[in-house]
Amino acid sequence: MRLTDLRLAALEEVAEHGPISAYRLMAQLRRRLARRVDPPTAYRALEFLISAGLVARLESRSAYVLRDRPGQLQPSVLLLCEHCESTVELADPGLLELIAGDAAALGFRLETPIIECSGTCRRCADLKEVSR
Ligand SMILES: [Zn+2]
């Protein structure tokens, strides 16, 4: 797999600004590369980064984030903070095997490899405690 200029720039923008929408990414790429970047080009770069296990799409926010363990293609559980938009990836294969097993028992084949859970991260929870 080749990391072209565009793909590398897209990866760096997601790392810096994620969760980032495809349209914001497109604007960032235009500015950064000083050339036209149309939606199909931006989406193709994102598709590549997703297929390489470097980036995950957050369905609930129509946005993209960097994965915690680049290159892993297994399903994943992402914890999303509603306050600061930070994300943490859970590394618990047992949890995912449980879900995959239950789904298989129903004859259901899992496609979307990302499970999203929203809430409040520790840092934001601590800040709330302090401000009380
Ligand atoms: Zn937070």
Image (spheres, rainbow, N blue to C red):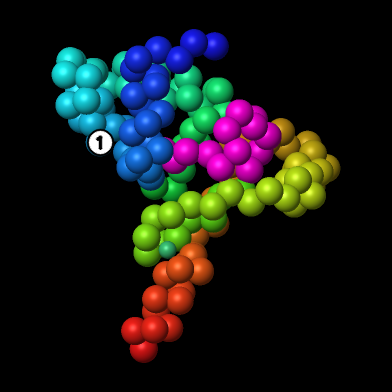
Q: Residue at x 38, y 36 (%)?
A: 14
Asked whether residue 98 is drawn in magenta, I would say no
SS under mark 1: helix
Residue sitting at the far bottom: 132
Q: Residue at x 41, y 62 (%)?
A: 82
When asked about the image quadrant of residue 127, the answer is bottom left
Q: Residues within 10 Å of mark 1 (few under 14, many from 20)?
A: few
Q: Nearer the viewer, residue 115 or 103?
A: 115
Asked whether residue 65 is drawn in magenta, I would say yes
Q: Is residue 99 visible?
A: no
Q: Is residue 30 visible?
A: yes
Looking at numbered disc 1 in the image, what kind of residue is underneath it? Arg
Residue 76 % position (x, y): 63, 43
Q: 72 above or below 123? A: above
When asked about the image quadrant of residue 46, the answer is top left
Q: Residue at x 45, y 15 (%)?
A: 3
The answer to whether 10 appears left or right of 26 in the picture is right
Q: Which residue is mark 1?
A: 24
* Residue span colored magenta: 64-76
Q: Residue at x 48, y 24 (%)?
A: 49
Residue 106 % position (x, y): 78, 42
